[in-house]
Amino acid sequence: MTAKLLKYKGYHGTVEYSLTDKVLYGKVLGVHSLISYEGETVSELEKDFRGAIDDYLEMCAKHHENPEVTYSGTFNVRIPAALHEEVAIYSAANHQSLNASVEEALKNLVNKE
């Protein structure tokens, strides 16, 4: 099951609930900056999420900074040496790069082609 996320202008945000404060809240994923939002209803949460993204983009523009790209397409993965060997052998046997094999596996993991 995939978690439900808010989406706006290429950014994704979590949806959480605080039992203590009785409020919905979340944060934007995939950026180093902390961009958070909250609301008492789903509608309020969605509105504050969009407002937080808009505020962030306006602040970047005001300071002549590029907004953070949520995902660059590059990441480092650490796996056991034996698995690394198996994937490298699989890749060679299938005439593809190690990156292509990992991409294939990740697509299968999230069920996307």
Image (cartoon, rainbow, N blue to C red):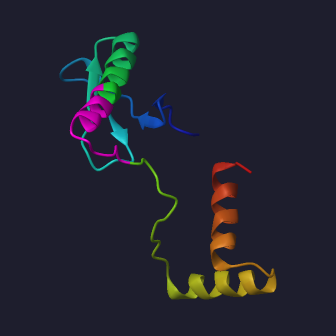
- Residue 76, quarter of the rendered image: bottom left
In this rendered view, identify the residue nearer to me: 83 or 96.
Answer: 96
Give the residue drawn at x 70%, y 49%: 111
Give the residue drawn at x 38%, y 29%: 15
Side of 47 where 106 appears, left or right? right
What segment is highlighted magenta in the picture?
A: 55-68
Residue 58, above or below 64:
above
Side of 104 where 44 appears, left or right? left
Image quadrant holding the N terminus, namely: top right
**Residue 101 position in % (x across, y down):** 69, 72
Residue furthest out toward the left:
21
Let me know if residue 99 is in the magenta part: no
Give the residue drawn at x 68%, y 71%: 100
Residue furthest out toward the right:
94
**Residue 22 position in % (x across, y down):** 24, 17
Residue 92, above or below 96:
below
Q: Is residue 17 visible?
A: no
Let me know if residue 59 is in the magenta part: yes
